[in-house]
Amino acid sequence: MAELEVPEPEKIGEHSRDTFSRTVALITALYAVVLAIAALGGSHAMKEMILNQQKASDQWAFYQAKVVREHQYRGMKLRAEADLLERGESMKPAAREKLQELAKKFADEEKRYSGEKLDIERDAKKLEHERDHYQTRDPYFLIAEGLLQIAIVMASVSILARSRPAFAFSMALAITGVLLTVNGYFFFLELPFLRGGH
C-alpha cells in the first residue's frame, strides 16, 4: 500500500494565497481592458463633440452671411420701390421699366437668401444636436475611467495586503465602471447628475 503524503499546513495556505493573487491579477487585467475601452469611448465622444461644434459654428457664420445678403437685397428693393413711388410718373417709360425689373430682381434675391438661410439654420441645429448627443455621453466615460483606475489600484492593494475586502471593493468599482462604459456607448439610461451641462 502506497504512503499518502499530507501537505504541510503552511504550504496549503501559501498555495491558496498564490491562487488568490493570480486570480486578482487576471481580473485586474480585465479591468485594464475595460479601462482602455472606456478611454476610447471618451476620446471619441470628445472628438465628435468638438468637431460638431466647429461645424455648427461654421454653419452659423454662413447663416449670418446669408442674413446680411438678404438685408442688403431688401434695402435695395425698398430703395427701388421708393424711387418708383417718388419719381415713377415723371420717369421715362424705359427707365421706369428698368427700375421695376431691378426691384423685382432684388425681391427675388431677398426671397432666395431667406430660403437658403433656413436650410443652413436647420443644418446648424442638427449639428448642435449631434454635439449635445456626444456631450451627454462623455461624462459616463470620464467617470468610468476614474472608477476603473481606482479599481486597478485597489486590486493591486488587495494582492499586496492579501485582502479580500479590498478586492471586493475593487470589484464593486469595476462593475460600476463597466456599467457606465456600456451606458456611454448605448445610452440606456440618463442619470440626472450626469447631464453634461444641460
Image (cartoon, grey):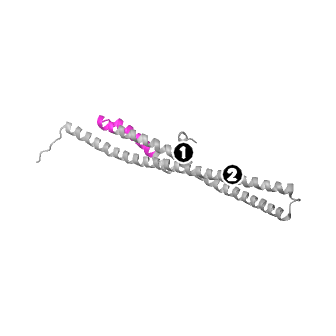
Q: To which quarter of the image does residue 168 belong?
A: top left
**Amino acid type of the residue that numbered disc 1 sits on in the rendered structure:** Glu
Most common SS among magenta residues: helix
Residue at 79 percent across and 54 percent down: it is: 79
Q: x, y percentage for residue 95?
A: 82, 62
Element marked by disc 2: helix
Can you say whether 113 is above or below 189 in the image?
A: below
Q: Earlier in the sequence, mark 1 or mark 2?
A: 2
Q: Which residue is mark 2?
A: 68
Residue at 25 percent across and 41 percent down: it is: 18
**Amino acid type of the residue that numbered disc 2 sits on in the rendered structure:** Val
On screen, residue 158 versus residue 90, left or right, reads: left
Q: Which residue is mark 1?
A: 190
> Who is closer to the viewer here, 91 or 43?
91
On screen, residue 145 versus residue 64, left or right, reads: left
Disc number placed over residue 180 in the picture, else none: none
Q: What is the crowding at mark 1: few (fewer than 14 residues within 10 Å), some, or many (at least 20)? A: few
On screen, residue 179 versus residue 56, left or right, reads: left
Residue at 40 percent across and 47 percent down: it is: 36
> Who is closer to the viewer here, 186 or 130?
130
The range drawn in magenta is: 156-179
Specify whether residue 189 is in view: no
